[in-house]
Image: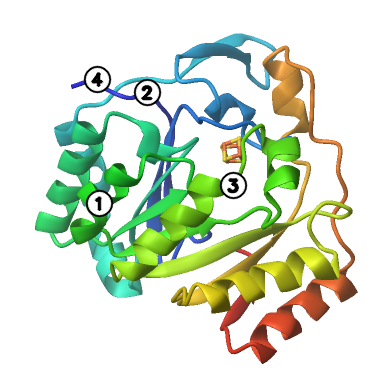
Amino acid sequence: MNMPYIFNIQKFSVHDGPGVRTTIFFKGCPIRCMWCHNPESQKYEPELMKNKDGKDELIGRQYTVKELVKIVQADQIFYDQSGGGVTLSGGEVMTQDIDYIEELVKELHRKGISVAIDTCGVVPPDNYKRILPYTDLFLYDLKLINSQMHKKYTGVSNDLVLENLKLISDQGGKINLRLILINEVNVNDEAICGIASWLREQNISVQSINLLPYHDFGRDKYRNLNRECTQNFEKPSDERIEEIKEYFEKAGYSVKIGG
Ligand code: SF4
């Protein structure tokens, strides 16, 4: 079993699913969204990044499943009181060694800790099938319904993203759909209505939609990693975000702005 690298374990998180959560950020992602605000999550290997004092810091370390479970179990009382749990995020957690991830998810499930998976969908479908029985919620990112545009901005088409979203829905997985909103990329009527029509046509069951306005808080990180910054976009206006919220609400969805 290959042990993944983890670059952050964030306790008392309230933006990565319901209630109070511990979010574990796995290092490594198969795609390259130009707006990514966690560029240190993209490479699967550890790497040096300058910290706030300008010193090189190694990002990424390994934990056994047992170590991780012990860390997250320390806050179980807060999960139980708030309806929270653990969120596995990244990078793309579902492209790590699936034996390791399955063992982790099974162990958390066995201990009564609710598990959410934050995923971009560019993942072999069999990996989802392995963890579906032990996963309480999927925080599923859908960036663009137009495949060519998806390829332009992330480097890959959205074929797998759509296939896996349907698979999870058909198999009864609970889904919070997360839509990042970026000006001049995916907030025009065609992009927004295209998502709603596709969800309807494919009979996708979505528990709620989270609208995540773009931000550029990751810009310094690119510099600290000595990489060219690709985060050169704009957030849509508050009015446009509100219009999109109303549009999805009228289509029958429960919608929240933010994570
Ligand atoms: S899927 Fe997430 S982690 Fe991967 S490149 Fe896109 S924004 Fe970054």
Q: Earlier in the sequence, mark 3 or mark 1?
A: 1
Q: Name the residue located 76 percent from the left edge and 27 percent from the top edge.
A: 220
Q: Quadrant of residue 67?
A: top left
Q: Earlier in the sequence, mark 3 or mark 2?
A: 2
Q: Earlier in the sequence, mark 4 or mark 1?
A: 4
Point out the frontmost of discs 4 and 1: 1
Q: Earlier in the sequence, mark 2 or mark 1?
A: 2
Nearer to me, 248 or 68: 248
Q: CA distance from mark 3 to mark 1?
A: 19 Å
Q: What label does residue 11 carry, if any?
A: none
Q: CA distance from mark 4 to mark 2?
A: 10 Å
Q: Number of marks in the image?
A: 4
Quadrant location of the C terminus in the rendered image: bottom right
Residues packed near mark 3 inside 10 Å, few (<14), some (14 to 19) or many (20 plus): many
Q: Is residue 35 left or right of residue 139?
A: right
Per the image, the residue denoted by label 4 is: 2
Point out the frontmost of discs 4 and 2: 4
Q: Pointer 4 and pointer 3: residues touching (CB < 8 Å)?
A: no
Per the image, the residue denoted by label 1 is: 129
Q: Is residue 226 left or right of residue 236?
A: left
Q: Amino acid at mark 3?
A: Asn
Q: Is residue 173 above or below residue 24?
A: below
Point out the frontmost of discs 2 and 1: 1
Q: Quadrant of residue 50?
A: top right
Residues packed near mark 2 inside 10 Å, few (<14), some (14 to 19) or many (20 plus): many
Q: Pointer 4 and pointer 2: residues touching (CB < 8 Å)?
A: no
Q: In the image, residue 123 lies at what x, y percent?
A: 42, 40
Secondary element type, mark 1: helix
Secondary element type, mark 3: loop
Q: What label does residue 5 carry, if any?
A: 2
